Image: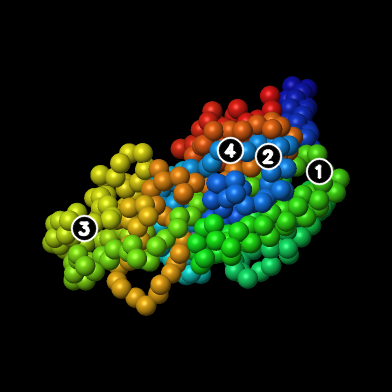
């Protein structure tokens, strides 16, 4: 009996001290907020006044640029930033794609698909956090509207394109004022600009420049609100983007319809400059030979894409991958639209596709300039800052650890 009581006491002590360590860890665990401003090209701040971002760089970290995963489109890249995996490994292989396993299509405007966890592979950082008992919140980050591995962020919002940025920001600030047991330690939020302006007016145009200056002024308000919080000194902030933007010239447009017959195509996904094509039975050779004869774009068979692009083995990347050459546009068919005047999706070797990375807070060095790195490395960085056990991913902490305080 005495032995039994001793054993019980031993277990109580051990588990008591473990939960005590856990609580203690949570009390000292920092906060991390990542904001993505869609299509914020890496070199916009070199010629457009962005005093607030400049101040963040001076007091923290700025990377020369952040290299997106291929294809440099919105959904593959936001989900790569969240999971640390290349699109080939997480399955959001383009903004729209065909899934041969289910016969279903995924598209960014298809609510049912976007909110269906079936499509999302890997483990997004908010799932890693929630699994380890850390609360997370998201305002419109790609993937956060779906249940993935049985989990969602503790707080999440259904995408509303026109929902004002100031109100998104106020919610983020309000979440940081929740009682400690409800307060998220990880917050991800999103603005769809300057991507829209970049497409509509082109990069480095008056319209896009004005939008960037407006967003920079919003960041000034955001920083003031963050700095007024009692927990301000525990908050780490990342400001980044999914890809850059390249000027498009409507006169330099190639058309797939000049090379291929509709009857050769079973399924075609994508829009300028990226397409994934599933060949009709027996038409693969005709398609491939016709497309390889084309000008101003490149075609690869799945499995033959250059290794540096990490693309082409996922079953959703169907038979042929087509991408326009930089400075060219590629449409399937002719239409009446003149624009867009800016675009992205191109090979990530084209630095116009690169995005910004700025960070500040107790985890980061001050005044540090980091070389260009890949956005798969963001997941290990975020997991490390938050003290989370990371999932196995493509990104590597060693590529980013140098930007952190010892
Ligand atoms: P694109 O420039 O074609 O790669 O896509 C950019 C668009 O993605 C933006 O204008 C948004 O409307 C859209 N978008 C971004 N995040 C979400 C989301 N979570 N749900 C639905 N649409 C989104
Ligand atoms: Zn985007
Ligand atoms: Zn875009």
In the depicted structure, whether residue 159 falls above or below residue 29 = below
Q: CA distance from mark 4 to mark 3?
A: 37 Å
- Of badges 1 and 2, nearer the viewer stands 2
- Image coords of residue 80 (percent x, y): 49, 47
Which residue is the site of mark 3? 294
Q: Secondary structure at mark 1?
A: helix
Which residue is at a point 38% across and 48% down the rendered structure image? 347
Is the distance from the Cβ of mark 4 to the nearest ligand 2 atom less than 8 Å?
Answer: no
Q: Secondary structure at mark 4?
A: strand
Quadrant where the N terminus sits is top right
Q: Is residue 194 left or right of residue 315?
A: right
Q: Give the mark nearer the N terminus: 4 vs 1.
A: 4
Mark 2 neighbour density, 10 Å: few (under 14) some (14–19) many (20 or more): many
Residues at badges 1 and 3 in contact (C-beta under 8 Å)?
no
Q: Secondary structure at mark 3?
A: loop
Which residue is at a point 42% across and 61% down the rendered structure image? 248
Q: Is residue 333 visible?
A: yes
- Image coords of residue 132 (percent x, y): 64, 41
Mark 4 neighbour density, 10 Å: few (under 14) some (14–19) many (20 or more): many
Q: CA distance from mark 1 to mark 2?
A: 18 Å
Q: Give the mark nearer the N terminus: 1 vs 3.
A: 1
Quarter of the image for residue 209 reads bottom right
Q: Is residue 240 left or right of residue 274?
A: right
Which residue is the site of mark 2? 57
Q: CA distance from mark 1 to mark 3?
A: 56 Å
Q: CA distance from mark 2 to mark 3?
A: 44 Å
Which residue is the site of mark 4? 63
């Amino acid at each position: 009996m005495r032995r039994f009581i001793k054993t019980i006491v031993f277990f109580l002590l051990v588990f008591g001290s473990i939960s005590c360590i856990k609580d203690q860890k949570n009390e000292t665990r920092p906060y991390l907020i990542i904001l993505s401003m869609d299509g914020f090209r890496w070199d916009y701040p070199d010629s457009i006044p962005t005093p607030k971002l400049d101040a963040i760089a001076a007091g923290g970290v700025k990377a020369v640029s952040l290299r997106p995963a291929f294809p440099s489109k919105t959904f593959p890249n936001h989900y790569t930033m969240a999971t640390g995996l290349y699109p080939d490994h997480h399955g959001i292989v383009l903004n729209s794609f065909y899934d041969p396993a289910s016969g279903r299509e995924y598209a960014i405007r298809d609510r049912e698909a976007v909110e269906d966890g079936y499509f999302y592979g890997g483990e997004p950082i908010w799932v890693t956090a929630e699994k380890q008992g850390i609360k997370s919140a998201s305002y419109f980050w790609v993937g956060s509207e779906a249940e993935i591995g049985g989990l969602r962020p503790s707080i999440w919002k259904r995408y509303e394109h026109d929902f004002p940025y100031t109100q998104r920001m106020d919610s983020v600030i309000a979440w940081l004022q929740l009682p400690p047991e409800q307060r998220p330690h990880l917050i991800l939020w999103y603005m769809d600009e300057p991507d829209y302006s970049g497409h509509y007016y082109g990069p480095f145009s008056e319209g896009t420049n004005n939008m960037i200056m407006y967003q920079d002024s919003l960041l000034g308000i955001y920083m003031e609100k963050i700095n007024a919080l009692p927990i301000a000194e525990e908050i780490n902030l990342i400001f980044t983007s999914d890809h850059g933007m390249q000027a498009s010239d409507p006169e330099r447009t190639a058309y797939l319809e000049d090379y291929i017959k509709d009857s050769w195509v079973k399924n075609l996904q994508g829009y300028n400059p990226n397409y994934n094509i599933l060949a009709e039975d027996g038409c693969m050779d005709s398609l491939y030979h016709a497309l390889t004869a084309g000008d101003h774009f490149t075609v690869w068979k799945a499995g033959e894409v250059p290794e540096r692009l990490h693309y082409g083995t996922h079953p959703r990347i169907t038979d042929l991958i087509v991408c326009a050459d930089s400075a060219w546009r590629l449409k399937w068919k002719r239409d009446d639209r003149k624009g867009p005047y800016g675009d992205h999706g191109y090979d990530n070797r084209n630095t116009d596709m690169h995005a910004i990375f700025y960070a500040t807070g107790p985890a980061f060095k001050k005044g540090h300039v980091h070389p260009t790195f890949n956005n798969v490395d963001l997941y290990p960085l975020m997991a490390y800052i938050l003290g989370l056990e990371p999932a196995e991913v493509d990104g590597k902490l060693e590529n980013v650890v140098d930007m952190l305080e010892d």
